[in-house]
Image (cartoon, rainbow, N blue to C red):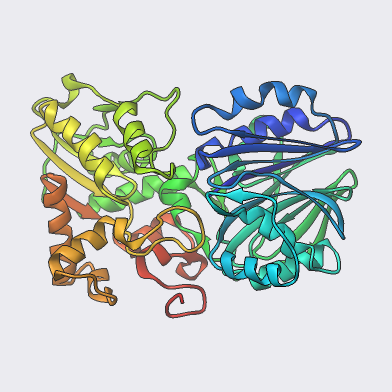
């Protein structure tokens, strides 16, 4: 999931834009980008895979000048893209995942259009989205027509002479929130970007809603719907603790999640509760609050220079980050029975090799791993996260138990079934932990605090909005 931010000012927006984009650094690891519109477009893109956004863009933002600007921390494509189109010139940033990008690319090729940007050997999705928008009668019509053609999700910010068009994807998988500070406006994927910059939240965009922000204020161009299917993983892992989505704070949701995990753990006795930093921390705090055992930090994260080990595209990079960033404290670990809370198991390699092994090596007596969500079964179709069935730890376990890949995994989705229990036991043994337990999906939904039908649960049950299964 990429993080997008836009700023509107009657003077120069570049400083607010710079810091607002930086507050999304936890969402992407590939590219950072900013575009400001003054007398003309000023656009900068840098690779941030080996450095921080702030250091790359600090000098850039000092010379950029204009009342309107957009920026992005991107998980894949180089952004913002610039298009000089039949609808006029504009810059564009996007967040989401377009599943049918190759089909749409070919459709545009057949119409005689070409692409100038390349991403990982294929089409740059943000440029593709921009080209689709230019097929409309105007910007708003183009965004709506783009929404109707894509499979997956796409929220966007589009910068042109009118100001900033903000559009949330039609099922609301990814969030957008608008803030106001007098005559200044901001639009952000993460609400935590707003308060320190002096903005008050005035509106959470609804699914499919299109809003124009400019010097005159906020103008709703298309009303949204109530058919939200926001990504549940925002509360489990992806989102920043201080952020709020659909009125629900991330940190409090994670505390409720930890409490739910502890309620199912009446049969174990431990000395301390720990979280895998950073996203497992609040789950562990909630667990400790419920069970009455002390929350302690046997593993600490060396933050400078090390980002999230989940988001980089290569396994080698993920392993390096996971190895370097977590440092064990032997004096806390040795001789103790420990509950370790984490957000999820995706591939399982990092938890085993760079968390569990460090705890055993430091003298842990018992290690009980508790996950804040159910087993991940289906690669995400709406954001760039898990990328294939083969890499998922739960699917590897099923393959080993069945002796082959199977298409129907419904029996493994039921936490009360024998097949589910065998799957968890297999993963438990593979991780080399004392016990392993996952959150139940109903408890996860209750911890988030939104109606089940308002949440995307595809990663765990394979179901899409209004469908039994995704195609």
What residue is drawn where x is 69% and y is 67%?
Answer: 109
Q: Nearer the viewer, residue 304 or 372?
A: 304
Q: Quadrant of residue 33?
A: top right
Please provide percent x and percent y for residue 13. 80, 33
Which residue is painted at 67% across and 68% down in the image?
A: 147
On the picture, is 427 further left or further right than 453?
left
Where on the picture, by quarter, is residue 380?
Answer: bottom left
Is 212 placed above or below 182 here? below
Residue 223: x and y in percent read 75, 67
At x 42%, y 66%, the residue is 458
The residue closer to the viewer here, 320 or 155, is 320
Q: Is residue 96 visible?
A: yes
Marker count (numbered) = 0
Asked whether residue 266 appears in the rendered view, the answer is no
Left or right: 368 as drawn, with respect to 115: left
Q: Where is residue 452 in the image (x, y as percent from the top left)?
A: 45, 68
Residue name at image x 74 percent, y 71 percent: 111
Task: Give the image quarter of residue 243.
Answer: top right
Q: Say above or below: 403 vs 199.
A: below
Tell me if 410 is positioned left or right of 95 in this view: left
Q: Position of residue 427 (x, y in %)?
A: 17, 54
């Amino acid at each position: 999931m990429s993080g997008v931010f836009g700023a509107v000012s009657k003077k120069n927006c570049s400083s607010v834009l710079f810091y607002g984009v930086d507050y999304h650094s936890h969402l992407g690891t590939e590219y950072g980008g900013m575009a400001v519109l003054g007398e003309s477009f000023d656009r900068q893109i840098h690779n941030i895979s080996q450095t921080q956004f702030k250091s790359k863009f600090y000098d850039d933002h000092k010379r950029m000048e204009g009342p309107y600007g957009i920026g992005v921390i991107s998980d894949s494509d180089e952004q913002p893209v610039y298009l000089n189109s039949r609808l006029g010139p504009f810059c564009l940033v996007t967040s989401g995942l377009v599943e049918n990008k190759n089909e749409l690319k070919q459709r545009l090729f057949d119409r005689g259009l070409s692409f100038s940007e390349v991403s990982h050997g294929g089409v740059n999705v943000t440029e593709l989205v921009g080209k689709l928008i230019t097929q409309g009668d105007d910007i708003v019509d183009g965004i709506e027509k783009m929404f109707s053609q894509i499979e997956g999700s796409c929220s966007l910010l589009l910068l042109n002479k009118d100001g900033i068009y903000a559009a949330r994807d039609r099922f609301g998988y990814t969030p957008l929130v608008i803030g106001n500070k007098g005559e200044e406006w901001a639009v952000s994927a993460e609400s935590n970007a707003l308060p320190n910059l002096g903005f008050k939240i005035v509106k959470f965009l609804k699914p499919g809603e299109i809003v124009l922000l400019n010097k005159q204020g906020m103008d709703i161009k298309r009303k949204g719907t109530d058919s939200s299917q926001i990504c549940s993983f925002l509360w489990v892992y992806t989102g920043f603790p201080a952020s709020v989505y659909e009125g629900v704070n991330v940190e409090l949701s994670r505390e409720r999640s930890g409490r739910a995990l502890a309620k199912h753990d009446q049969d174990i006795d431990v000395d301390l509760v720990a979280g895998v930093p950073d996203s497992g921390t609040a789950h562990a705090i909630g667990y400790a609050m419920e069970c009455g055992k002390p929350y302690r930090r046997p593993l600490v994260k060396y933050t400078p220079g090390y980002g999230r080990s989940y988001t980089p595209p290569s396994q080698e990079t993920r392993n390096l980050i996971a190895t370097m960033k977590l440092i064990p404290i032997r004096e806390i670990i040795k001789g103790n029975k420990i509950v370790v809370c984490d957000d999820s198991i995706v591939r399982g390699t990092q938890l085993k090799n760079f968390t569990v092994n460090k705890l055993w090596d430091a003298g842990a007596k018992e290690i009980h791993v508790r996950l804040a969500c159910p087993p991940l079964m289906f690669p995400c179709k709406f954001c760039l996260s898990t990328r294939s069935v083969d890499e998922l730890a739960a699917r590897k376990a099923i393959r080993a138990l069945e002796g082959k890949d199977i298409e129907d995994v419904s029996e493994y989705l039921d936490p009360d079934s024998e097949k589910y229990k065998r799957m968890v036991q297999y993963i438990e043994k593979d991780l080399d932990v004392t016990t392993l337990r996952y959150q139940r999906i109903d408890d996860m939904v209750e911890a988030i605090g939104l109606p089940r039908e308002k949440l995307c649960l595809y990663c765990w049950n394979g179901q899409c909005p209004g469908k039994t299964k995704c195609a």
